Each structure stands twice: as C-alpha cells, then as structure tokens.
Image (tube, rainbow, N blue to C red):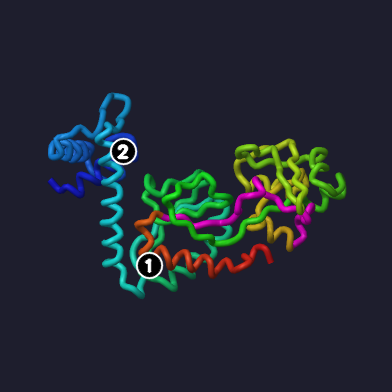
Amino acid sequence: MDQFAAMRAFVKVVETGGFSEAARQLELAVSSVTRQVNSLETMLNTQLLNRSTRSITLTPQGRNYYNRAVRILQDVEEANLCVMEREDTPRGLLKVGMPVAFGRLHIAPIISTFLTQYPEVKLDLRLSDGLSNLVEEELDIVIRIGNLDRSHPNLIVRKLASHSRVVCASPNYFQQHGKPQHPNDLAHHNCLLFAYTDYNIWRFQRDTEVCEVKVSGTLVANNSEILRQVCLDGAGLILMPTWLIGEDIRARRLQAVLTDFQVSPHAETDMGIYALYLPNRRYSLRVKTFIDFLIQQFGNPPYWEA
C-alpha cells in the first residue's frame, strides 16, 4: 500500500463528503479510492469513517488522523514545490479563483502580459461569484473583495489593492430626481440593490457621524454588471466599487454623490482586494510572482481610482 496515496484518498473523501466525488477529483475509480481508505484503516487497525448510504462522517479517531494527515500532505507538497521551482524561474500550473466581474475587467486584460513574461507558468483561472474553497477546489490562490472577517485564520493574506465604493447615478437620473445631499435622502430615491447580507442597509461615516440608511428600489440583482447597466440607462442609483464604475465616472457617464462620506459595511473593517493562499504555498515562486505582478499592475492607489 502507498500510504501517501491512501492518505490523500482519505483526506479527499472527507473534504468532498463521499467516495464518488473524491474519485472524480482524484481521477481514479471509486473502487480504487475505497480500497485505499480500507487499507489505511486496516493498517492503523482503526475505523476512520462512519459509512452509511446517505453520508460519511469522521469517527473521533478519524478526526484526529485527518487533522494530522492534512498537515503532513501540506508539508510534503511544500517540500516538492521547493525542489521543483528554481529560485529564479516560476514554473508549473497555477490555479486561481476570482470574482467574475473583477476577473473580466482587471485580470483578463493583463494575462497575456504575465504569460509573456513567465512562459513556464500555465494558468487555470476559475471565475465565480461564490466563495471559492482553496482546499476543496485545489486552488493555489483565491482573490476576494471586501472584508475578511469570515476568512479562516490559517490562510495567508496579501492585500492587492484598496477597495472603495461610491454612490452614483447617470446625469439623466439626477436631472429628473435631483441629487441626494445627505445619506438620509437616499430613502426617497430608487436604489438598485446588489443582493447580499443586509443589502438594503447602506452605511456611511463622516468624521464621527455614522449613518445607516434603509434603502429600496425596483431592482435587486446578484450580478454587479447588470446593476451597472441599468444605472447607466438612468433607472436609479447604485452603490458600487470604483473598480467597476471608475471608468464610467471619468467618462461622465455616471456622477458620484455623497463623496464626503466613507462607505463601508462596518466602520471598523478594512476593505480591500486580497489574495489568499494556504501556508503550504508560502514558498511557491509562481504564487509569489503572480501576486507581485498583480500588485504592480494595479498600482497604489489602483489605476481605477485615478
């Protein structure tokens, strides 16, 4: 029995919740994964998993073994990375998860430059507006936007750029409905809403003044680019990040208002655009190179806030 292969199979079964999905991700037959986990249990003389027709759960011994096995496999992968990548040449496959709109607007235009500069790196980009899981999806890097209050403490975080949001609308909308002079005025405007937790509460701060405004409107959507387009068409106000609507403001297709207020879901949180990766990637040259490249390309402050 290949114990490392059996450990990988066991860990993957736990992470995916079943033998079939684990086998699919490992590109093995279900019978092979089952055999590896059974052999591991036989070698340890311990039951690691409780199996039923509906679910698989860890035994107390299995939970302890899983936690240690994950650390061991991460150490092995880290050791392999140190050997595989020469000190001055990033190489190999790099899997990166990111939000759809941000990836399309700010990652896609610079990918060819990165691949030209680092021809021995192969990129696998996964665009999704869900919270990508580094472990389950076997990603090297995840790009997340906002605050990191819910992030796992064992992840390594690097800030790529600042993240600020503004309230804006088209000149035509303001001609018809006037401009809000204070956040409380937003209660009387048609606010186009991005669907997330507490999406109808917009929070503002100016010096010591803190405002929470309950807003409403004729459209709620879970896609920021749809809201942007409807706003451009003059249908209402949006609260959106400058990386999405910065060019529209520069071109005067949209006008920002209430700019003397800071917009934040919580005044005490740090809003940013971040790269997250597991500790076993800390010595990966391709991870470091890609993150450094993004930081250099975005600038400080980022170019979309110019």
The alpha-carbon separation of the residues under discs 1 and 2 comes to 29 Å
Residue 306 at least partly seen: yes
Q: Which residue type carries mark 2? A: Val
Whether the magenta-drawn stretch holds residue 244 is answered as no
Which residue has dot 1 on it?
285
Residue 219 image position (x, y, % from top left):
70, 37
Q: Secondary structure at mark 2?
A: helix
Q: Dots 1 and 2: beta carbons under 8 Å? A: no
Residue 82 image position (x, y, % from top left):
29, 66
Residue 24 picture quarter: top left
From the viewer's perspective, tell me whether residue 102 is left or right of residue 36: right
Q: Secondary structure at mark 1?
A: helix
Q: Which mark is residue 149?
A: none
Residue density around tag 2, few if under 14, some if 14–19, many if 20 or more, within 10 Å: many
Q: Residue furthest bottom?
A: 88
Residue lying at 31% horizontally and 31% vertically, measured from the top left: 57
From the viewer's perspective, tell me whether residue 255 is left or right of residue 162: right
Whether the magenta-drawn stretch holds residue 268 is answered as yes
Residue lying at 35% horizontally and 73% vertically, measured from the top left: 89
Residue 194 image position (x, y, % from top left):
65, 42
Residue 279 picture quarter: bottom left
Name the residue nearer the viewer: 88 or 158.
158
Residue 102 image position (x, y, % from top left):
57, 55
Residue density around tag 1, few if under 14, some if 14–19, many if 20 or more, within 10 Å: many
The N terminus sits in image quarter: top left
297 over 275 or under it: above or below:
below
Which residue has dot 2 on it?
14
Find the magenta span and give its range. Answer: 251-277
Residue 23 at least partly seen: no
